[in-house]
Amino acid sequence: MPPRSRRRGLLVYLGVAYAGMWAAMAPLLAGGFQRGDARQDPGALEQACIAAAMFAPALAAILVVRWVERGGRVRDALALRWPRPWGRAVRACLMALAVPAGLTAAALALSTLAGRYPFDGLHGDELGTWAGAAALDLLLSLPLFFGEELGWQGYLFPRLAGDGGRAALVRAYVVTGAAFALWHLPTLLMGGQYPGRPWYVSVPAMLVSCVLVLPVFTWLRLRSGSVVPAVIGHAFMSTASVGMIKEFADPRAALDPLHMGIAGWPGWIVLGAFVAFLALTGRLRPAVGGPPVEARRLTASG
């Protein structure tokens, strides 16, 4: 694609994705909504606004592919396909659940050791009920996360990565992560991810979180050749991972996401270590002229 067309596509994508987020959040911003407690669940209006906002990146990506790039089928352009063969698809989806779960558990363990997470133990009689509800919630939320990841992983990252050179890849990871974080600005202003924190704390914290977590989602996408595992991983991080913080904490204790879980400094340490491992082992580099290295291994083994 000519550089001029690529730049135009990127600008249109970001403009539509950001405009869609602000438009969806306008009713809450106009009403002065503020989330002051990490245990506070969104009401009906908040849920409707969040759902509308989450479809904005996908809408932007489809618009650019169809009417700006005019470069083929949307499904192919955004990697909206199942990994093949089916055995690899199952393994990729299981990995998209297991890795976020392990990273969240490690972050909570680190926070507990530091005395910042009020761990209340594992209660077997309640754990099964919670796990079932969390699985259902994750399943029902998947369409919303397709709305996000078709934009960030399906469209933006591959266009920024270009030919896969080292400088282009670093830029793609950092710029996509930063764009992903700043897209959340309206919710950050309302205390969405960091309740009770002012914007000058929550915005930098979100930037760090997204720049570190984005390579995990990208790795899931690259190793499978599909955006689907990235969607599942993102859905887990935003639903079950947050639920783990509440489920395993003392119900009487206050929760501060800045000091626990993936969105806080314990998560930054855990994510940083995992991303460093992925980078050092070459798992964050797209393959040139063929499927990702990890995908080739999976194909050969199954």
Image: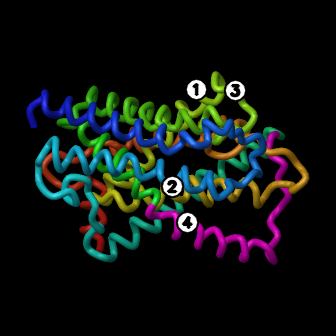
Residue annotated with mark 2: 51
Could you tell me what secondary structure mostly forms the magenta stretch? helix
As rendered, which of 152 and 120 lies closer to the eye?
152
Query: Which image quarter is the C terminus in?
Result: bottom left
Q: Image height check: is 232 above or below 136? A: above
Residue annotated with mark 1: 204
Name the kind of residue labelled 2 in the image: Ala
Residue 160 in view in this figure? no
Write the start and end of the magenta stretch as one range.
Answer: 116-143
**Element type where label 4 sits in the image:** helix
Q: Position of residue 203 (x, y in %)?
A: 58, 28
Residue annotated with mark 4: 138
What's the residue at 48%, 37% (across, down)? 22
Q: Please tell me whether mark 3 or mark 1 is closer to you in this view.
A: 3
For the view shown, which residue lies furthest in the left direction?
Answer: 2
Q: Position of residue 280 (x, y in %)?
A: 39, 39
**First of labels 2, 1 by sequence position:** 2
Report how far apart the C-alphas of labels 1 and 4 lie in the structure. 27 Å
**First of labels 2, 4 by sequence position:** 2
Report how far apart the C-alphas of labels 2 and 3 lie in the structure. 24 Å
As rendered, which of 299 and 107 lies closer to the eye?
107
Q: Image height check: is 214 above or below 72? A: above
For the view shown, which residue lies furthest in the right direction?
Answer: 252
Residue annotated with mark 3: 198
Q: Position of residue 37 (x, y in %)?
A: 78, 44
Q: Residues within 10 Å of mark 3 (few under 14, many from 20)?
A: few
Name the kind of residue labelled 4 in the image: Leu
Q: Could you tell whether 238 is left or right of 105 in the image? A: left
Name the kind of residue labelled 3 in the image: Pro
